[in-house]
Amino acid sequence: MTITEKILAEHAGKKEVAPGELINARVDLILANDITAPIAIREFNKIGADRVFDPERVAFIPDHFAPQKDIKAAEQCRMLKVFSREQGLELYFEVGRMGVEHALLPEQGHVVPGDLVIGADSHTCTYGALGAFSTGVGSTDVAASMATGECWFKVPESMKFIYYGSLRRWVGGKDLILHTIGDIGVDGALYRAMEFEGETIRALPMSGRLTMCNMAIEAGGKSGIIVPDEITEAYVRERAKRDYRFYRSDPDAEYVETREYDCSEIEPLVACPHLPSNVRPASELTDIAIDQVVIGSCTNGRIEDLREAAEVIGGRKVNPNVRMIVIPATQAIYKQALKEGLIEVFIDSDAVVSTPTCGPCLGGHMGILAKGERAVATTNRNFVGRMGHPESEVFLSNPAVAAASAVLGRIGLPDELGL
């Protein structure tokens, strides 16, 4: 079996499972945010449920419109707080404790290798970077799972992606996943588990692995997953709040498709409007003027991303025609960035720094685009109207390209700044 099939079989209490099989499986963690949790709470009450199955296994994180941007957002967030208090949920994260959910939960050790995690958010697939099976589900599924501790699944087929070769400078996990999505398309892995492996992946830091698995959904994937190794062990050893287990795919496991990529040929990439699969080299887009740059999100708001952006923009100024917004993904990342002087670098460059939030990624707040405006963002989606006006445009990139673009006032590369 593949790593995905092994995790699902274990959680379903079966010796083995096969692609296409319908199973009921116990879940290790359920999560929802200030947009999706209120729906789940209403459905939970509607089915007559009294208590959640385990108050230590349900996480509510107000991160999409928080800190609350208006009355409606405030009412949504209040629902999370009241329900969490009534149910005694240990994993309710109020503003000040919260962060972007998919950065916060791994950082705090609430997701561990071997877990089965569901979340009412499509980017729940992020946790596959730890060797867990994690996937986004609807709020009604979350409601049922909060009551029972189980969820139903159709076992997905698995695709294998093998990456080899050394990465060029300024190329990282974001470029690898953009290259992959550009190759197979936004439905190229529809309802499949995307298993990433190869020498390049084994050398990739956890931050890059989290970025790759985060965007599996942008290829239609049911999940993204990486077989855990010593890098995984180093990441979870001091964080894990629970025991964990490393699963790995059998040598004779079956995959519906296998693709290989020579990563030494991949240069910094940009996904152009209005699909994550509309990928081109950044070097071919240097004539496109921009109005905004966003560094952050569950895709690229980690400390490694902020370091990369600060290295590029340090000692330089944001172009006067551009606004640059930097959003550390969690309070711990924000604090570390302060200690390392990164926040000062950004402010000295005329960027603004926000408290942790999803913010502009989903067109929430603090960075909405006007008609005709263009943004370069380290986020994960660039659909029509994603960050604001339907006639605005979003270009997705890694933090280095985003920071260089902020200085140049157009899409550009760190090399153009002599880096």
Image (tube, rainbow, N blue to C red):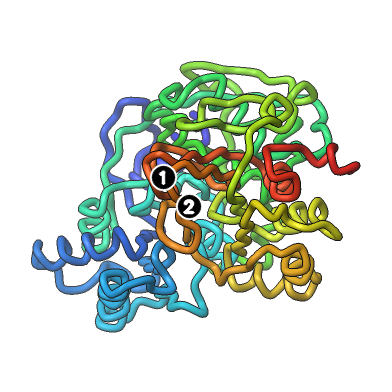
In this view, the residue in front, 417 or 108, is 417
Q: Would residue 323 be found to the left or right of residue 63 on screen?
A: right
- Residue 341 location in percent, x, y? 80, 71
- Residue 54 location in percent, x, y? 32, 70
Within-10-Å neighbours for mark 2: few <14, some 14–19, many 20+:
many
Residue ID at (48%, 22%): 185
Residue ID at (45%, 32%): 274
In this view, the residue in front, 383 or 256, is 383
Query: In this rendering, is residue 9 above or below 120?
Result: above
Query: Label 2 belongs to which residue?
Result: 361
Residue ID at (78%, 58%): 317
- Residue 354 location in percent, x, y? 58, 69
Q: What element carries label 1?
A: loop
Residue 130 makes an appearance in the image:
no
Query: Label 1 belongs to which residue?
Result: 386
Q: Do the residues labelled 2 and 1 touch (CB within 8 Å)?
A: yes
- Residue 142 location in percent, x, y? 27, 56
Residue ID at (31%, 69%): 73
